[in-house]
Image: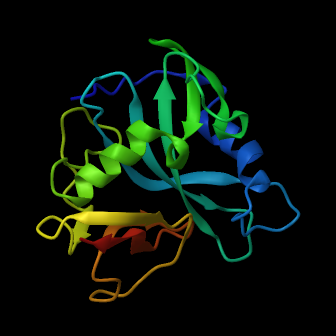
């Protein structure tokens, strides 16, 4: 299991995302620079112990309707060979681990492999800021027994009411800037 280091990162993840988010085709904000706030998320463990995996949910406090975004992140100790240049969100100096190359997790094979493992019931979502602590609030609907084929990560998140959502999906919660707790579908998949 990955250890969470309570230390600094310079620049911070939210600083990197403030620059990166507006350059994404799915970004729903306006012309103003985003003001991302951490609103929720969870971690996954890399079985090899090489890649940090975080599924961060951020809200754009500057947007009129407080848009929420899912940003899967891959933290690596070196640049990833063969990664497209635009997959790199940025680099940051970690207070314990040194330089981290932070990639868009949707474009990282380790992150997507572990997302598939969660959907198949072979991996357990972990608390975002506590080591060795499962996060039971992250749930999978319709995956484990049937297997998983295609997975679609929802970048712009919409709240759903209890009982709503796809028959094959990964559901988790986040907090809006006004303090309201909501849940939504982070990823959908086609059962095998």
Q: Quadrant of residue 68?
A: bottom right
Residue 85 or residue 56, whichever sits in front:
85
Quadrant housing the C terminus: bottom left
Residue 192 or residue 23, whichever sits in front:
192
Residue appearing at x 67%, y 26% in the figure: 11
How many badges with numbers are in the image?
A: 0
Residue appearing at x 54%, y 45% in the figure: 107
Q: Position of residue 117 (x, y in %)?
A: 24, 50
Task: Please indicate, yes or no, whether residue 34 appears anywhere in the rendered image.
Answer: no
Q: Position of residue 44 (x, y in %)?
A: 31, 42
Horizontal side of residue 29 vs 48, given as left or right: right
Residue appearing at x 64%, y 39% in the figure: 87
Q: Position of residue 16 (x, y in %)?
A: 68, 37
Determine whether 109 is above or below 33 in the image: above
Residue appearing at x 18%, y 41% in the figure: 133
Determine whether 147 is above or below 123 in the image: below
Quadrant housing the N terminus: top left
């Amino acid at each position: 299991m990955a250890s969470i280091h309570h230390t600094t990162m310079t620049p911070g993840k939210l600083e990197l995302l403030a620059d990166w988010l507006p350059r994404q085709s799915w970004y729903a904000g306006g012309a103003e620079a985003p003001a991302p706030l951490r609103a929720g998320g969870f971690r996954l463990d890399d079985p090899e112990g090489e890649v940090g995996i975080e599924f961060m949910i951020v809200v754009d406090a500057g947007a009129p309707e407080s848009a929420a975004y899912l940003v899967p992140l891959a933290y690596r100790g070196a640049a990833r060979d063969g990664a497209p240049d635009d997959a790199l969100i940025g680099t940051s100096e970690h207070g314990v681990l040194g330089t981290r190359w932070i990639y868009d997790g949707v474009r990282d094979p380790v992150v997507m492999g572990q997302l598939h493992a969660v959907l198949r019931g072979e991996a357990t979502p972990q608390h975002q800021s506590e080591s060795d602590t499962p996060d039971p609030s992250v749930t999978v609907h319709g995956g484990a027994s049937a297997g998983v084929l295609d997975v679609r990560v929802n970048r712009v998140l919409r709240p759903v009411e209890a009982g709503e959502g796809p028959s094959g999906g990964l559901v988790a919660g986040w907090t809006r800037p006004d303090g309201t707790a909501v849940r939504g579908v982070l990823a959908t998949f086609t059962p095998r």
